[in-house]
Structures are given as C-alpha cells and as structure tokens.
Image: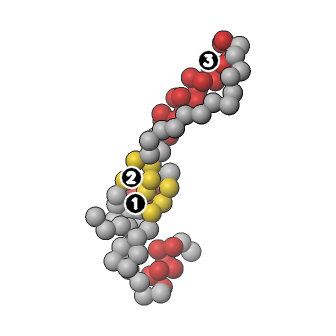
Amino acid sequence: MNVIDALTEMGLEVPRDFSVIGFDNIDIAANPHINLTTISQNKKKMTELALEKLLHTINEKEDDLPFHLVLKPELIIRSTTKK
C-alpha cells in the first residue's frame, strides 16, 4: 500500500488534505493515474559526469578521490500538491 492509498482509506484527499512528494522522478511518477509531484535529479547529467570522471581517472592515472559535485535538483509539480 502506498501513502496515497492509505490517505484515501482514511477519508482524506490528496492534495486537498495532504500533499505527497516523491524523490528521483522515477518513470512511474509521471503516470497519469499517479501524477506524483517529485524532486528530480538530472540522472542523465549525473551519468555523464560520472563517466567523464571515471575516464579521466583511468586515462590520466590519477586518483584524486574523493570527488564531490552538487547538481541542482528540479521540483516537478504534478497533481499530488496544490499549486
């Protein structure tokens, strides 16, 4: 059972009574039956940067780990929150 189902069983409505927000913007979040507001991380950019770092480390024979990079997340508002 998910949070939205549990709230519905309690007689509450999303988003009238509660807002529900997910994280990572998995593909099912955009499903019209779910339409979950979510925090999206740019998975494509994260992958590109990780591969660039890996290839640089391999090719340059450098090991300058730990390596930290912060990407700005994006809020994608859908029907589980009020606008």
- Quadrant position of residue 34: bottom left
Using the image, determine if residue 70 lies above or below residue 74: above
Residue type at numbered disc 2: Leu
In the image, 69 versus 58, the foreground residue is 69
Q: In which quarter of the image is the N terminus?
A: bottom right
The residue drawn where x is 43% and y is 57% is: 38
Using the image, determine if residue 17 lies above or below residue 60: below
Q: Which residue is label 3 attached to?
A: 56
Q: Residues within 10 Å of mark 2 (few under 14, many from 20)?
A: some
Q: Are marks 2 and 1 in contact (CB under 8 Å)?
A: yes
Residue type at numbered disc 1: Thr
Residue 28: image x %, image y %?
A: 47, 57
Q: Residues within 10 Å of mark 3 (few under 14, many from 20)?
A: few
- Upstream in sequence: badge 3 or badge 2: 3
The residue drawn where x is 41% and y is 75% is: 18
> What is the spatial separation of the Cα atoms under label 2 and label 1, in whole angstroms?
8 Å
The residue drawn where x is 50% and y is 55% is: 23
Residue 32 seen from this side? no
Q: Which residue is label 2 attached to?
A: 75
Q: Which residue is label 1 attached to?
A: 37
> What is the spatial separation of the Cα atoms under label 3 and label 2, in whole angstroms?
31 Å
Residue 60: image x %, image y %?
A: 66, 12
Q: Which circle, 2 or 1, is nearer the viewer? A: 2
In the image, 68 versus 6, the foreground residue is 68
- Upstream in sequence: badge 1 or badge 3: 1
> What is the spatial separation of the Cα atoms under label 1 and label 3, in whole angstroms?
36 Å
- Upstream in sequence: badge 2 or badge 1: 1
- Quadrant position of residue 72: top left
Residue 78 appears left or right of 20: left
Residue 31: image x %, image y %?
A: 40, 59
